[in-house]
Amino acid sequence: MRSLLSAALGLVCLLGNSQTVDLKFMSHNILNYSGTDANRGRWQDIKLVVGDYQPDFMVIQELNDATGATKILDSALNVNGQTNYARAAFVNGPDTDNMLFYRADKLFLVGQYQISTTLRDITRYDLRSISGTDTIFFSVFSAHLKAGNQPSDETDRLNEINAFCSAISSLPSTSNLIFAGDCNVYSSTEAWYTKFTSTACSVKFYDPINMPGFWNNNGAFSTIHTQSTRTSANSGCCGGSTGGLDDRFDLIHVNYNTLVGTGGMKILSNTYKAYGNDGNHFNAAITDAPANGVVSAAIAQALFNISDHLPVVATFRLHADFTGISESNTENNAVQFAQDRLFVSTSGDGLFNLSVYDISGRLVHTENLNLSSGDQIIPFIKQLESGVYYFSISNSLIKFGTKAVVE
């Protein structure tokens, strides 16, 4: 017990000596946005939404021209005394395009790259932190996959992800990766999605909220639907789809490092949201009764005006001490904790004991795990308060563990 307490106290000292930085992220399909925007000044609505959420970095899809990117930067972001937002270079690829906006006082854009697919480019933005912590590098991918629910559309989406998985195959295993955008996906069983979230892709990506299923027109997923903000009776500005909120088209997914924090960057639990979705507007417009329970009426109207898609948002924590948090793992035996899951790899089968200790060395949870040799994901349903914990897994032959910060 003393060794566990010493190890935990050592981690607290490290945490006290290095400052964390939290970065708020947004991804939004803004529906064929152009600098001319003749139908209405949607930049005014974008200004309301980003002013309410205040993202530190943001990607958008369905941008039509560089003039539109500049309009958003100058009229929606760098306003009301804010002068620190910058944007990436506009690349005019096939069909509509992507764009990154970011706080230049917090992040530096190292580079950007286009990944060509059968329809639209997926854009990779490489960023590094410049304040508050040791330098952390990460990459954000903005994507807009093929629309449609026909078999040929699913095949097109698979081809796009095949190109993506090939393009990222040479990235270092230590990379922090965020994939975001309008994926036009109807369920987690689609071929592209099952590849994207498995080792069949060169990098496996994870759903931070772990909610697989058939998302289309399914009220069980009403809190995470992102399209459509409109119904057939009130289609809103500038075209787009109607039918009310009944699809989870827009996603944020991360690689393993970014899920658990082993690369110095970690997605924070309970921060992933379909922004403006209160769960009470299934198959309804975002502005319909009842009044929205998570944003003001003005923000709900702005979301309605901007696009047929809601944004998706999440917060990421940068902290150098996330690196190497698994100090007592042995060869072929490892465990990581992330939100509501344990990621375990063992060299043997059988019954193992899981013990969880808090910062004082007090045992706060114990259970038996029936583990198989190899990699596996174990649901962890125990609710832990914020703090530092030590997870220990053992049987008569093997003992290994990890320290984890629970927000």
Image (spheres, rainbow, N blue to C red):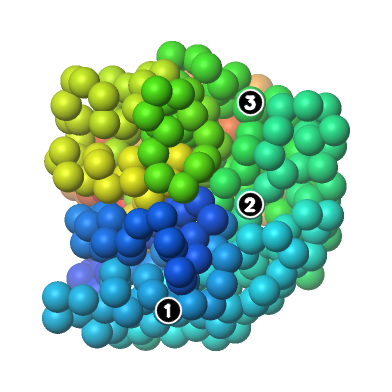
The CA span between labels 2 and 1 is 21 Å
The CA span between labels 3 and 1 is 35 Å
Q: Which amino acid type corresponds to the residue marked 2 in the rendered image?
A: His
Q: Residue tagged by mark 1?
A: 70
Q: How far across and how far down the image is residue 229, in percent?
A: 39, 34
Residue at the farthest front position? 38
Residue 75 image-quadrant placement: bottom left
Q: Which residue is drawn at 33% across and 61% down?
A: 41
Q: In this view, does 80 lie above or below 285?
A: below
- Numbered marks: total: 3
Mark 2 or mark 1: name the one nearer the start of the chain.
1
Q: Which amino acid type corresponds to the residue marked 1 in the rendered image?
A: Thr
Q: Residue tagged by mark 2?
A: 144
Q: Residue tagged by mark 3?
A: 187
| Label 2 close to label 1 by CB (< 8 Å) | no
The CA span between labels 2 and 3 is 16 Å
Q: Which residue is drawn at 55% across and 51% down?
A: 181
Q: Is residue 273 above or below residue 97?
A: above
Left or right relative to 334: residue 103:
left
Q: How far across and how far down the image is residue 76, in percent?
A: 29, 69
| Label 2 close to label 3 by CB (< 8 Å) | no
